[in-house]
Amino acid sequence: MLEALRSGRLSLGPFVERFERELAEWLGVSDAVAVSSGTAGLHLGVRALGWGAGDEVLTSPFSFVASANCLLYEGARPTFCDVDPVTLNLDPKRAAGAVGPNTAGVLPVDILGYPAAMREFERLAAQHGLGLLQDACEALGARDAEGAAVGSRGVSAVFAFYANKQLTTGEGGMVVPADPDAAARMRSERNQGRAPDMGWVAHERVGFNYRLTELQAALGVAQLERARELLGEREAAANRYVERLRQSGGEPAGEGDPAALVLPCADRGRERRSWFVFAVRVPTGADRDAVVADLAQRGVESKAYMPCIHLLEPYRERFGHRRGELPVAEEASERLLALPFFPGMEEAQVERVCEALEEALRGNWT
């Protein structure tokens, strides 16, 4: 950070190029394009694929709203499909059943850091001639069913570096482009439509101010040096939670009674989650929102995480979505609770949260 400040160059400088190069090397890909946010990266990914008015894109309703908003920016329509009840990722079978004459692409999300079923989505895209864009904003460091690093499959993938992510630049993001042409277009569009060899006020296309600053990139370089350490600390904290909550009757999704306290699903085969948040599903019959309020009174911050996109007001009003359309996602949304979670979280802190959660669950039932 000090080196960037002392250089006198705060934008369009060497630290952005270095961050791009070093993250690409870390992922094992040939290129990466730094942008101002994950949302900006998703928008540029949509534009690179040419999705626009009249196009429908299959995606998950159980995600941060940016994964759907990025389609609306270009006039495309998100077609929401239900999620897998264990991983909470977009269900490939549901997506396959939703392909229609206007379907132009698929936008799977690696929700809560668990890798999406990209192998199946690649087959679906190839079968129907669809574009494919991976929202990996919550999954830096995860590995998919074939053991490949998320973002390294040759499909355009987007990472985010907001303050709560595995690696942070405060605000920021990175796109792994599908090919050199997509990379060149993204670098132009993030910089107001300029080309590398054009003058400061010459523009070859309509673009945006989606640049990452030198200070943010410098922070990203420093964070990347500690990436394995930071990911390991998150995994250790998650393991402490799992071990402690099993003592309270909690079971990982897909392994126990779905009416009990449901923990995040365990890794399957070669799949490896990158721990973004630690979220549990409260038992059936427990009042999740009352539990959040109870925990707050006990000095423990938690969040209802997260609302279904199709039930948010802009989507209900514009597309007529109603409750009951996507029951798996909606049920998860009503039960999911994000607990305090950060690198270096100690056993005593985990214990305090778990004790408070046990007390809150005992007293809040519908």
Image (spheres, rainbow, N blue to C red):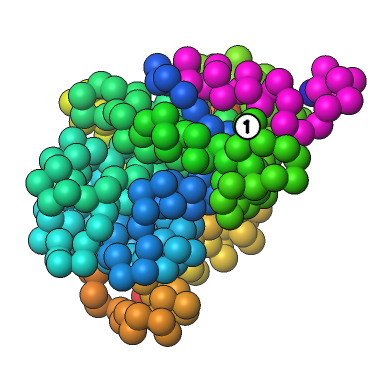
Where on the picture, by quarter, is residue 151? top left
Reply yes or no: does residue 61 show up in magenta.
no
Mark 1 element type: loop
Q: Which residue is mark 1?
A: 196
Q: Find residue 186 and report its horizontal and vertical position in percent.
A: 51, 40
- Quarter of the image with the C terminus is bottom left
Where on the picture, by quarter, is residue 12? top right
Q: Find residue 284 and report its horizontal and vertical position in percent.
A: 28, 64
> Is 239 in front, or is 107?
107
Task: Give the residues in magenta.
Answer: 2-26
Q: Is residue 63 above or below residue 171?
A: below
* Side (left or right) of 146 relative to 70: left
> Is 316 in front, or is 364?
316
Reply yes or no: does residue 21 show up in magenta.
yes
At x 81%, y 31%, the residue is 10
- The count of marks equals 1
- Quarter of the image with the N terminus is top right
Q: Is residue 25 above or below residue 275?
A: above
Secondary structure character of the magenta stretch overall: helix
Dot 1, crowdedness within 10 Å: few (<14), some or many (≥20)? few
Name the kind of residue labelled 1 in the image: Pro
At x 63%, y 19%, the residue is 18
* Side (left or right) of 301 relative to 70: right
At x 57%, y 65%, the residue is 293
Q: Is residue 106 above or below residue 191?
A: below
> Is 113 in front, or is 295?
113
Is any part of residue 330 visible from this angle? Answer: no
Q: Find residue 43 and report its horizontal and vertical position in percent.
A: 49, 52
Q: Find residue 198 and report its horizontal and vertical position in percent.
A: 67, 36
At x 15%, y 61%, the residue is 99
